[in-house]
Amino acid sequence: MRILIGSFSHESNTFNPERTKLEDFDAAYGQDMEVLMTQGGRSALNGIAGVLQKHGVEFVFSAAARATPGGPVARAAYDSIKNRILEAASGPLDGICLHLHGSMTVEDLDDAEGDLLAALHAAAGPNVPIVCSLDMHAMVSAAMLRSAQAFVGYRTAPHIDAYETGRRAADLLLRSLQESFSLTTAAVALPLLVSGEQSETSKAPMKQLIPLLIQTDRQPSILASSYFMGFPWADVSISAASALVVTRDDRDLAERTAQGLAHVFWQHLEQFQFTTAAYPFPEALRQAQAVGSGPVCIADCGDNPGAGGSQNTVAPLEHLLAEGTTDVLFGAIADPQALAVCEQAGRGSDIQVELGRTSIAENSPGLKASGRVTHLGELGRTRAAVLRVQGVDIVISQRRTMMLDPQDLVQLGLDPASYRILVLKSGYLDPKYEAIAAAGMLALTPGYTNQRFSELHYERILRPMYPLDQDFVYRPSDYLIR
Ligand SMILES: [Zn+2]
């Protein structure tokens, strides 16, 4: 049996005007995917490969490409990776199993996954089933449903079940091939904007909703059910959460069950609140200072690179400096020019530098700061420096990088646990930060990942859309995606 495998993953924030380019992707093609996969740990693609390998399937390698969330993917980058996947589909295949994010937008294309799957379906032919694992923050489109047979979504946020989800996708494809049945999928849109910080799966209401999926999957003829949360910082026509059900060739059952799941989800609507205490930045700082021990982690979540923020807004830093706060780490600010100034001056030098930008308005100036370069080195996989300004250690990085692991700060020579307050360019805290934090909170800051959706200028999403619109009646039967 020959099955094409691959992954193409990007969460695209359409408010961020910076394009995600080909060099921003960690990508490998064909046989070279194997090297990338050995470093991939418990990725969805490794989950897919693990199941297929065990069943003696012959792999047709296509592409494995992922980039840090950011602005929409540049057309040339998208076409380049897409074409590599299509080339791999030109020979005889029994099936296709991919991991996709589900919220990728290309600069001139709202529904990248729909476009990719339609092209792949056309290239491979109508008898080659396609099954995909998707991130929980996927937007499911009609084009995706027309082109692929089945989708399986993560059930944890923060996402710790990527590997298992990949396994479930591969299992589904294999079973349908071995037992010769068709996979039939239906999905119902849920017109709401909800952020990951309002829908962590260890907290209500997701904590109640996820077990419902597990229960649903126990019903005869139902193979997989998922809730997808959509992606609120994609101002595109297909923006929505959804309930999706895969059955053993039973369209009516798939549609009915998806509508039932959508109905229950909508009943929990008002429970989608921040799952961590959330305040405007000045109040978050006051709250953090009131905590007796440290470090208190404040997520600067309006500028979260993990959801496509530019990671260079400095409004909270201005506030910290104006207040004369000490014993604080702030960062990382992705600013290659400021980093170059630090590197040229060298460790121990006193410098003046312009940092990041004070707002997301076009041509917004940076923050002028004077301080001492105390550390130079690496932060995860990017070069970085620490600039001490008054009592604030500012981490400056060359590239955008998610603040997921305090070990990255250790690598730079810092001791994250020794600060009273860590202000991190992050959304909900990664479990690794949670492990060292005396307390955690969200600061509702400005930026491309602003959590106060009413402050963003949406133009393309369909209306009504909760919570921008509140007075409307939701009927799942009106929202079947097809
Ligand atoms: Zn996600």
Image (cartoon, rainbow, N blue to C red):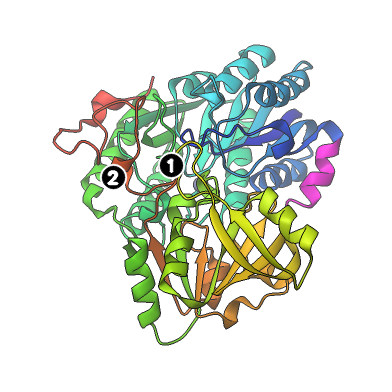
C-alpha span from label 1 to label 2:
11 Å
* Residue at x-position 61% and y-position 13%: 126
- Under 8 Å from ligand 1: the CB of mark 2? no
Any magenta on residue 355? no
Q: Residue at horizontal 65%, vertical 41%?
A: 67
Q: Of residues 305 and 263, which is closer to you in this image? A: 305
Query: Of helix, strand and loop, which one carries label 1?
Result: strand
- Residue sticking out furthest to the bottom: 292
Q: Nearer the viewer, residue 384 or 144?
A: 384
Q: Which residues are magenta?
A: 32-40
> Left of 140 or right of it: where is 54?
right
**24 above or below 212?**
above
- 289 to 64, vertically: above or below: below
Q: Quadrant of residue 386?
A: bottom right
Q: Amino acid at mark 1?
A: Ser
Residue at 79 percent of width and 65 percent of height? 346
Question: Residue 378, can we see it?
Answer: yes
Q: Is residue 402 visible?
A: no
Where does residue 206 sit, x and y in percent of width and height?
36, 54
As displayed, is residue 328 above or below residue 340? below
Which residue is tagged 1?
Answer: 226
Q: For this view, does 166 lie left or right of residue 466?
A: right
Q: Quadrant of residue 61?
A: top right
Q: Which residue is mark 2?
A: 265
| Residue at 80%, 39% in the rendered image | 33
Amino acid type of the residue tagged 2 in the rendering: Phe
- Quarter the N terminus occupies: top right
Earlier residue among tags 1 and 2 = 1
